[in-house]
Amino acid sequence: MSKVSSEGAISATSLSYAGMLRELARAMRPRQWVKNVFVFAALAFSEERLWRFWDTSVGPGPLLRVCGAFVAFCLAASAIYLVNDLVDIEKDRAHPKKRHRPFASGRLSPTVGIVAATVLIAIAIPLAYAVGPGTAFLGVLATYVAIQGFLYSYWLKNVVILDILVLAAGFVLRAVGGAVVISVLITPWLLLCMLLLALFLGIGKRRHELILLENGAGEHRRILAEYSVPMLDQMMAIVTASIIMAYSVTAFLAPVAPQEPYPMLMLTIPFVIYAIFRYLYLIYIRGEGGAPDELILKDPPLAGSVVLWGLTVLGVLLLFPT
């Protein structure tokens, strides 16, 4: 039988091998891998025609390389989550929800986390080189790991405003990586949309943490003392309007979509507006926003709007070729 510590946590040494793997998988946050779908943006919003990636004369190479890039980002992201949890292990123990994480609860040994993170990076690096071209994608992935895994975990997470901007930059790097791996140009407007969307989600998450932790927010994470709910609400209002405007311009000008008689990607704008408003509803009325990836998976209206958006984009690009 498993031994239980005085704090009610299961001792890491008492877990079976299978139990340790389950806890390690949980710490790797596979649900967060949904964020890495941004690497596929280049397939739909590049300055190349969509059919190029399925053309039998070209072969499945480009699509397979983007899938490889997706896997590489998943491996790197999981390694970063492990490192971040190890750095924040004491602070997480003071958090009402994060104290149940594998490392903070004591169910998983820090040594296991260090070894696992090293192995994940060791697999991601040769994979990034293999999908190519050359060392271009490897350079993007290395930049992502350096910024998110080291600069953010050890320094930038404690710098007000930069902490949110750095997390948002991770989404842009995913999109850039997807474009680099298939050697295409991606519209700058789409990169701006991704940056703004990531800021939108990051600000909502910070707001949720402030409300959840109340007066003890600064004790759990020092940077939270630099924020206030009214300040974050102002930032949220600015970013919300900016997302809608930036995406509308993207839909109007996207070179991959037909422009006559009208820019056909305009059809996707209502889904984007609904998804944003639905997320605001979940933040302000339901008190959600702490885990954006989980919200998308568990809120049917939000998930439905995202799925309909994706199907509409695909339908426009396939049915109305330029």
Image (cartoon, helix red, strand yellow):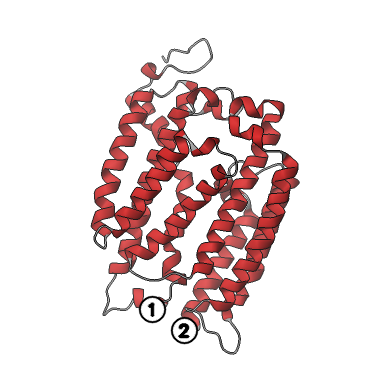
Disc 2 on helix, strand or loop?
Answer: loop
Residue 36 visible to an observer of this rendering: yes
Residue 259 position by quadrant = bottom right
Residue in the foreground of this view, choosing between 8 and 179: 179
- Kindly identify which residue carries mark 2: 321
| In this picture, residue 261 sits left or right of residue 1 | right
Q: Residue at x 44, y 53 (%)?
A: 36
Circles 1, 2 touching at the beta carbon (< 8 Å): yes
Per the model, the C-alpha gap separating discs 1 and 2 is 8 Å
Q: Residue at x 47, y 39 (%)?
A: 152
- Kindly identify which residue carries mark 1: 51
Q: Residue at x 42, y 30 (%)?
A: 23
Residue 159 in percent (x, y) is at 55, 38
Count of number-bearing discs: 2
Image height of 6 relative to 297, above or below: above
Disc 1 on helix, strand or loop?
Answer: helix
Residue 37 visible to an observer of this rendering: no
Q: Amino acid at mark 2?
A: Pro
